[in-house]
Image (cartoon, rainbow, N blue to C red):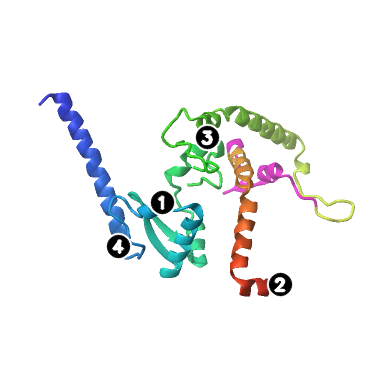
Amino acid sequence: MDLKVLVLFTAIAAILLKFILNYLKARNSVKNIDGPTSIPLIGNIELAFLTNTNQLQWFFKNAKNFQKYFKMWLGTELWVVIYDPEMAEKVLTNPKLIKSNDYVFLKPWLGKGLLLNEETSMGLKMNSQNESNVPYVKAVNDLKVVSETTQKVISERRKYYAERPDELQESTNELGVRKRMPLIDTLLKAHVDGQPLSNRDIEDEVNTFLFAGHDTTSHTLGYFFYNVAKHPEVQEKIFE
């Protein structure tokens, strides 16, 4: 057998072996977690044939069938769906929570801010994880211009307060009401472990606030009102 063919065959075999071992490891890790019946290597394929509304109903149905959480598979990708508030709080407040690879393309913009510390596509399939020439990915890479502008603003603001340290303090207006400091000033004043935040740290957090504030409130309120409408007894308590 030709050496190149042998090397190629060995590489492919190694990749397949690693893939299978990771898949079996994932299945074994959740063997004690209940969930809807899935087909090995294919997963819960029925989801692919449901409309958005019916997909939501599918999740609601399984939320009733299983206590607090359940497992599901999208192909070979494992998902654990949590709908118990206390359990969700433990997951979301865990400092060791590691983001999935789905967040990778946001790092050039948000850096290591709060959201990405340790594909959203408006309903369109952009394939941004696999294709570097997708227009959206190019746009994210071009954010260097925005980053340079932000860094300039932060540097100028830092220099301003270095010359006027007394101004980096909370103050009150003529009515005695405490004036809120701008976000960038609050971050300049902040310290972590006794050390001031770097310009990069501040930029990451500012970008995270801008990103996280984009339609998140409206979506949350929309889902809140939907749930209130679905539960009249809760709606009555709110009214009271």
Q: Nearer the viewer, residue 134 or 57?
A: 57
Label disc, if present, on residue 57 of the rendered structure:
none
Question: In the rendered structure, are the residues bearing label 3 and label 2 in contact, judged by CB atoms less than 8 Å apart?
Answer: no
Task: Measure the alpha-carbon separation of dots 1 and 3.
Answer: 34 Å
Question: In the rendered structure, are the residues bearing label 4 and label 1 in contact, judged by CB atoms less than 8 Å apart?
Answer: no
Note whether 105 is above or below 236 in the view shown. above
The location of residue 199, given as percent across then percent down, is: 61, 36
Mark 2 lies on residue: 239
Mark 3 lies on residue: 108
- Which residue shows up at 64% across the image and 57% down it? 221
Note whether 131 is above or below 189 in the view shown. above
Please name the amino acid that badge 2 sits on: Phe
- Whether residue 198 appears in magenta in the rendering, the answer is yes
The location of residue 97, given as percent across then percent down, is: 46, 53
Mark closer to the chain start, 4 or 2: 4
Secondary element at tag 2: helix
- Region in magenta: 179-200
Q: Nearer the viewer, mark 2 or mark 1?
A: 1
Q: Nearer the viewer, mark 4 or mark 1?
A: 1
Please name the amino acid that badge 1 sits on: Phe
Label disc, if present, on residue 31 of the rendered structure:
4
Q: Nearer the viewer, mark 4 or mark 3?
A: 4
